[in-house]
């Protein structure tokens, strides 16, 4: 019995690690292949006035002159040591950028969780109260449909609707 639990949790951990790896690769590559020049994000309008030698030096300084796969491997190695690099947009260490925003993120996430929990509880009570009636059937259908829409796409829709 104990060995079955170890195998079960081992598989879950392996699936988690593979998922994190795939997600990190996808996010890294999408960020690097996005349109726009990272040098412009970091240096601004000064990039246009740079000579080819200065541009090459700046690319080397930011680590952008190597293939994307090499950049990713270096980023992973540094990430295991707690060094996530420099934000091109804010020109600060990424840990500092995240640290300055984590409080607001946790408050917003907590409020969102409370609203979702209260709403789900109220809808559950409503469905139990009107069991097997029209309201129950409609709410169950809406719940089924909304659970089929991943949260990412719902968030994207909300961002587009409420800019």
Image (cartoon, rainbow, N blue to C red):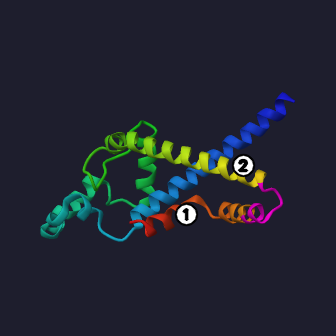
Which of the two discs, 1 and 2, sits closer to the camera? 2
Above or below, 35 against 96 in this view is below
Say what secondary structure mark 1 lies in: helix
How packed mark 2 is, by other alpha carbons closer than 10 Å (few <14, some 14-19, many 20 or more), is: few
**Which comes sooner in the sequence, label 1 or label 2?**
2
Residue 131 lies in the magenta stretch: yes
* Highlighted range, magenta: 130-138
Q: Which mark is residue 76?
A: none
Above or below, 113 against 48 in this view is above
Count the marks: 2
Read off the residue under disc 2. 125
Specify whether 50 is left or right of 100.
left
Residue 61 or residue 129, whichever sits in front: 129
Q: Quadrant location of the C terminus?
A: bottom left
Residue 87 or residue 107, whichever sits in front: 107
Read off the residue under disc 1. 154
- Disc 1 to disc 2: CB gap under 8 Å: no
How packed mark 1 is, by other alpha carbons closer than 10 Å (few <14, some 14-19, many 20 or more), is: few
Say what secondary structure mark 2 lies in: helix
């Amino acid at each position: 019995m104990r060995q079955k639990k170890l195998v079960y949790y081992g598989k879950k951990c392996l699936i988690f690690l593979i998922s994190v790896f795939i997600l990190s690769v996808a996010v890294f590559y999408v960020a690097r292949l996005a349109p726009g020049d990272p040098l412009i994000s970091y240096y601004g309008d000064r990039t246009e006035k740079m000579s080819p030698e200065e541009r090459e030096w700046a690319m080397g300084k930011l680590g952008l002159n190597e293939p994307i796969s090499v950049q990713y491997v270096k980023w992973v190695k540094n990430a295991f040591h707690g060094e996530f690099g420099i934000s091109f947009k804010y020109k600060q260490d990424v840990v500092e950028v995240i640290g300055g925003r984590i409080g607001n993120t946790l408050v917003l996430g907590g409020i969102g969780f409370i609203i979702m929990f209260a709403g789900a509880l109220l809808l559950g009570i409503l469905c139990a109260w009107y069991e097997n009636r029209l309201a129950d059937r409609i709410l169950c259908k809406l719940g089924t449909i909304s659970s089929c829409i991943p949260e990412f796409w719902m968030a994207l829709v909300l961002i587009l609707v409420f800019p």
